[in-house]
Image (cartoon, helix red, strand yellow):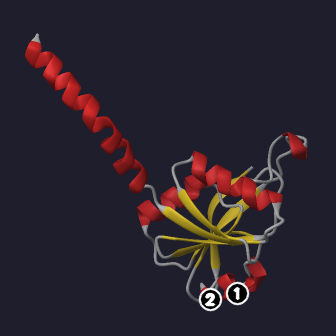
């Protein structure tokens, strides 16, 4: 019984370290957005709820989009950087996780514009409406292919 209690005490003592380690392992998404944009902040919350750490720069995203090689025609209201990939617009966390797992040769992912129903553009504020949209894989030459469709 004493050995069991000692093992239990050791396991409990290690728990805070395990939690810290798990948090430290969360992929970091660096995000550039307008300081007054509510849907951008909702997208940040979506990422956080889905296992990502975030660092937000409230200075706009045009310079970051250009620097990361994301074509302006695919632009949206925020731009992210994770694992060396650009993430433009309201890309679902599920597709970002897939991107990091598959590691394709690409600039990153984009959801151009601001489709209603995409993460950050969803919920009661939008009447729970869902418009169809595509998540695009953006290649180095600026071309795209559909990475995932949401209907």
Residue 55 in the image, given as x and y percentages of width and height? 58, 66
Query: Camera-side residue: 105 or 14?
Result: 14
Q: Quadrant of the N terminus?
A: top left
In this rendering, the answer to whether 119 lies above or below 101 is above
At 53% across and 55% down in the image, what residue appears? 52
Q: Counting other residues with Cα less than 10 Å from the Cα at mark 1, is it few (<14), some (14-19), or many (20 or more)?
A: few
- Callout 2 secondary element: helix
Secondary structure found at label 1:
helix
Residue visible at 19% across and 30% down in the picture: 10
Examine the rendered structure and indicate whether residue 65 appears above or below residue 101.
below
Q: What residue is shown at x 49% (from left), y 58% (from top)?
A: 98
Mark 2 packing: few (<14 Cα in 10 Å), some, or many (20+)?
few
Q: Position of residue 7 (x, y in %)?
A: 15, 25
Query: In the displayed structure, does residue 124 sit left or right of residue 63?
Result: right
Residue beneath label 2, please?
67
Q: Which residue is mark 1?
A: 63
């Amino acid at each position: 019984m004493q050995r069991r209690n000692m093992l239990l005490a050791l396991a409990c003592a290690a728990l805070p370290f395990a939690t810290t380690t798990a948090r430290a392992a969360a992929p970091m998404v660096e995000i550039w957005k307008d300081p007054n944009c509510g849907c951008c902040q909702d997208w940040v919350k979506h990422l956080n709820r889905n296992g990502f750490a975030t660092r937000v720069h409230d200075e706009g995203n045009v310079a970051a989009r250009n620097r990361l090689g994301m074509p302006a025609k695919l632009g949206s209201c925020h731009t992210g950087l994770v694992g060396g990939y650009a993430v433009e617009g309201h890309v679902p966390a599920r597709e970002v996780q897939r991107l990091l797992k598959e590691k394709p040769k690409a600039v990153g992912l984009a959801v151009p514009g601001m489709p209603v129903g995409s993460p950050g553009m969803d919920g009661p504020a939008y009447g729970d409406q869902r418009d169809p949209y595509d998540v695009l894989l953006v290649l180095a030459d600026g071309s795209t292919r559909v990475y995932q469709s949401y209907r």
